[in-house]
Image: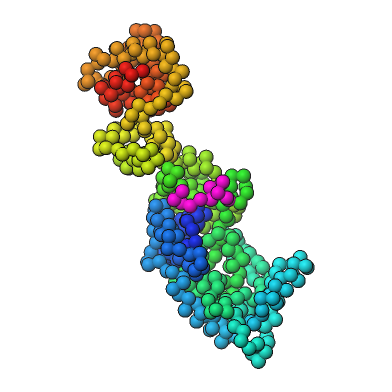
Amino acid sequence: MSIIVRFAPSPTGYLHIGSARTALFNWLFARHHGGKMLLRIEDTDRARSTTEAVGAIYKGLEWLGIDWDETPVHQFERSGRHVEIAHTLLEKGLAYRCYCSVQELETMREEARAKNLPPRYDGRWRDRPAADAPEGVKPVIRFKSPQTGDTVIHDLVQGEVRVSNQQLDDMIILRADETPTFNLSVVVDDHDMGITHIIRGDDHLTNMFRQFHIFKAMDWKIPHYAHIPLIHGVDGAKLSKRHGALGVEAYRDMGFLPEALRNYLLRLGWSHGDAEIISTEEAIQWFDLDHVGKSPARFDFVKLTNLNGHYMREADNERLVTLVVLFIESAHGLSLTAEDRDLLKRGMTGLKMRAKTMLELAEMSLFYFAPQPLSEGARKLLDQDGVKLLALITDSLVGLPETSWTEEQLENHLREFAETHDVKLGKLAQPLRAALTGSTVSPSVFDIMHVLGKDKSLARLNSK
């Protein structure tokens, strides 16, 4: 069997982080099995669906490195097909017209609430003859759900799931204005697209039972279901904005790399032994539904940030320069020259070892373009004794030839200076770092001096 899965977001906002994980799991499952992942935009909610949101979904997926096969399907454009199936079910006696008024439905809900029961339709038009239809009232079409027994489905993540059919009331599949409802549209599209596996969040478990019966009523092959537990915050509560329930583009703007976020999302609810750092190639090779857990995963910003730090250290320097320039120019209002970019490239190896996000990297890089204001810690290092020591160091560096202004030669020179003046090397490095960068935290001072060059280095040391 050729595997075909789908990712089916609603374009009512950004690509939510939970939806991004669902897309990733579908993509990996399809790629692992040599199948297809299709993209379906479920835009039937015309009041809330926007072209901007559709664009955000495309951009979010592309940034994460998740592609899809074939042309995306827009559900609204297929509404005629959905209406056709609703009438087919009606003709087969598996659906019926319901003429209940808004007041009647509200009364049903009030009676259910009074008995501490979930609100449900009581089926009063299920078997009534057409002759009873009131004049001038446009009916809805309801699906005839089974009324006795249980519905049992084997879910590839949840295992056997069961519901009493008495809990499944006769849902509306076509509204009075002839617009199809979600559960009908999804089933028709999944069938017509040849979907073999439906991988989605477990908030759709209730929908699964309803959709299952439409498949059966139409004698269509029922896909395999896999419902993934939702993502919670690190405190175990439902994921909210304070936990990280943001759009994918927000993580990009916070300075996370797509491969880091992809790796982190993969490990939210799925595991492969003790592996934490997993390449895309390994993920495709290893991914299957067997190791998706049944418990909610917990989103932890600290773990994501640490993982991002690993990927930044492994990233190509030229790529990081291209990315960090965007952050520097947008966040700090600078316009970097070709010389500035070259400076960044030469200093990137040292810079990226300490940064965990692109925002941090941008902040840490600023000292290369202009002397920075002294931090409180740097000001303490450059007290009267610190300035005297700095002046001695600077004098010793003046005579060092330009050809010797390398990281190795600078370190050797300062080690000799430290021995001559009976000072520990770390004691020398502290005021040097403060004078060169304005901070107490930076890459190696030898690396910084090499990257800046002799003239710029001495100019900064002499200015303190």
Can the viewer see residue 295? yes
> Is residue 291 placed above or below 183 in the rendered structure?
above
Q: Residue, x 39% and y 52% (percent of image)?
A: 63
Residue that lies at the very extreme toward the right in this rendered image? 115
399 left or right of 371? left
Q: Residue, x 38% and y 27% (percent of image)?
A: 372
Quadrant of residue 123 within the rendered picture: bottom right
Q: Position of residue 95 (x, y in %)?
A: 60, 82
Question: Disc count in the image?
Answer: 0
Tell which of 114 and 40 is nearer to you.
114
Quadrant of residue 119 within the rendered picture: bottom right
Tell which of 21 and 75 is nearer to you.
75
Q: Position of residue 277 (x, y in %)?
A: 45, 43
> Is residue 22 placed above or below 367 in the rendered structure?
below
Residue that lies at the very extreme toward the bottom in this rendered image? 131
* Residue 299 colored in magenta in the image: no
Where are the magenta residues, as a range?
Answer: 239-250
Its colouring scheme is rainbow
Q: Residue, x 51% and y 67% (percent of image)?
A: 47
Q: Position of residue 56 (x, y in %)?
A: 43, 57
Q: Quadrant of the N terminus?
A: bottom left
* Residue 247 colored in magenta in the image: yes
Q: Residue, x 74% and y 70% (percent of image)?
A: 110
**Prevailing SS of the magenta stretch:** loop
Q: Position of residue 397 (x, y in %)?
A: 28, 15
Tell which of 375 and 20 is nearer to you.
375
Can the viewer see residue 353? no
> Is residue 385 placed above or below 222 in the rendered structure?
above
